[in-house]
């Protein structure tokens, strides 16, 4: 009978060390049964990748994990930790209600303070009007100006409407502009710009005062000035049809008055009347003798200068003229004088 050769041991298999002798007095442990040799693993096919496998005796690496540890919540008073519950945050509506209530309290307090301050201001005798200062008046007195503006001594200074007072004072035809201001605690200051009359304008059977700009601002009254040049030749129909044109015509005549004052004529021969003819030509009556200067059509400045030279020569000759014609526009150097 032939003997079979024993199988070779598997590769990478360690041999178990021989059992050590049991110490005296102890029984030797039972010897484990010898494991059967494992069959050889088949060779991997050609041209195929072989993945490394974890050895059977080694356990796989644990996966990476992150663990957060929270401290234990303190237990509620008189109860166990399980009975403690987190406090619920205030709802959005409750917060809005709190904000609204706070705003309402602020508004009410501010209104109360403002009402109290206003009551003190309008009732305190400290802010009663004691002094009224009026500047710029000549035709009107300070009492008349203050009365027309509704400004009264003893009245509360804050109850005075400044714009309304200024408008009321300006309704007086002699007053062109009025400005009313407060000076705390008890003074009202009124500044007035009065109109200045430069001429009387005869329209129909009535006389009107005119400013330097030719504006007809009021009808002549008893206490109004009358020692002014009189403008004649303007009809009521002209004023109704073309008031702006009438204003320009009066302004042009007052320009002639200014030129005659500058030339010295008005000082020697006061201006009595300025008449506008139907064709627009101008005749100026001057002096006590009533000398008529026919100036014709504008411009008038050169004609006024020539009239000044003629009057000077007549005064040197001690001659009395009644009419001086300066209206020859074709030959302005020719002057015709009609003697008395």
Image (cartoon, rainbow, N blue to C red):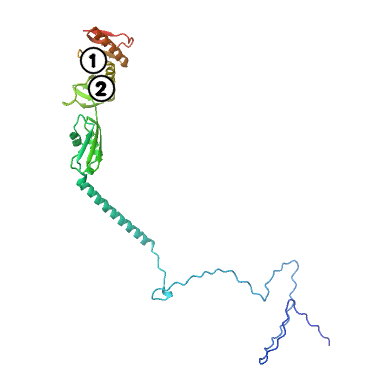
**Residue assigned mark 1:** 268
The residue under the point 29% across, 53% down is 110
From the image, state whether disc 1 or disc 2 is nearer to you.
1
Give the structural element (helix, strand or loop) at label 2.
Answer: helix
Total residue callouts = 2
Q: Quadrant of the N terminus?
A: bottom right
110 is higher (above) or lower (below) than 310? below
Q: Is residue 110 visible?
A: yes
Instruction: Give the alpha-carbon distance from disc 1 to disc 2, as whole Å.
Output: 34 Å
Along the line of sight, the residue nearer the viewer: 317 or 145:
317
Along the line of sight, the residue nearer the viewer: 191 or 340:
191
Q: Earlier in the sequence, mark 1 or mark 2?
A: 2
Say few, some or many: other residues with alpha carbon within 10 Å of mark 1 (under 14 / 14 to 19 / 20 or more): few
Q: Give the image location of residue 97, x and y in percent.
A: 34, 60
Q: Quadrant of the C terminus?
A: top left
Question: In the orientation shown, which residue stands out farthest toward the bottom?
Answer: 25
Q: Is residue 276 visible?
A: no
Give the structural element (helix, strand or loop) at label 1.
Answer: helix
Say few, some or many: other residues with alpha carbon within 10 Å of mark 2 (under 14 / 14 to 19 / 20 or more): few
The residue under the point 35% across, 58% down is 99
> Do the residues under discs 1 and 2 have CB atoms within 8 angstroms?
no
47 is higher (above) or lower (below) than 318? below
Q: Give the image location of residue 228, x and y in percent.
A: 21, 21
Q: Give the image location of residue 178, x and y in percent.
A: 25, 34
Q: Quadrant of residue 128?
A: top left
Q: Quadrant of residue 202?
A: top left
270 horizontally vs 55: left or right: left
158 horizontally vs 38: left or right: left
**Residue assigned mark 2:** 238
Q: Give the image location of residue 221, x and y in percent.
A: 17, 26
260 horizontally vs 86: left or right: left
């Amino acid at each position: 009978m032939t003997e079979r050769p024993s199988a070779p041991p598997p590769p990478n298999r360690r041999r178990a060390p021989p059992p050590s002798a049991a110490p005296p007095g102890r029984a030797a442990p039972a010897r484990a049964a010898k494991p059967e040799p494992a069959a050889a693993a088949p060779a991997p096919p050609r041209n195929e990748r072989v993945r490394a496998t974890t050895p059977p005796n080694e356990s796989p690496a644990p996966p990476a994990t992150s663990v957060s540890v929270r401290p234990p919540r303190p237990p509620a008073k008189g109860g166990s930790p399980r009975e403690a519950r987190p406090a619920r945050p205030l709802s959005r509506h409750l917060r809005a209600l709190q904000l609204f209530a706070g705003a309402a309290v602020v508004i009410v307090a501010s209104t109360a303070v403002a009402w109290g301050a206003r009551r003190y201001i309008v009732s305190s005798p400290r802010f009663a009007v004691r002094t009224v200062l009026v500047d710029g008046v000549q035709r009107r007195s300070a009492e008349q100006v203050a009365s027309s503006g509704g400004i009264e001594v003893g009245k509360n200074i804050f109850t005075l409407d400044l714009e309304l007072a200024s408008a009321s004072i300006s309704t007086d035809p002699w007053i062109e502009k009025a400005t009313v201001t407060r000076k705390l605690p008890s003074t009202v200051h009124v500044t007035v710009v009065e109109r200045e009359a430069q001429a009387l304008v005869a329209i129909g059977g009535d006389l009107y005062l005119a400013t330097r700009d030719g504006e007809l601002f009021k009808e002549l009254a008893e206490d109004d000035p009358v020692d002014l040049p009189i403008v004649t030749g303007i009809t009521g129909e002209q004023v109704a049809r073309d008031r702006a044109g009438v204003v320009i015509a009066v302004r042009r005549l007052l320009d002639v008055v200014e030129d005659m004052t500058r030339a010295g004529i008005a000082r020697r021969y006061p201006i009595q009347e300025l008449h506008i003819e139907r064709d627009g030509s101008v005749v100026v009556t001057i002096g006590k003798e009533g000398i008529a200067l026919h100036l014709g059509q504008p411009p008038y400045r050169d004609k006024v200068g020539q009239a000044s030279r003629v009057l000077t020569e007549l005064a040197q000759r001690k001659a009395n003229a009644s009419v001086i014609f300066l209206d020859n526009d074709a030959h302005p150097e020719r002057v015709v004088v009609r003697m008395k």
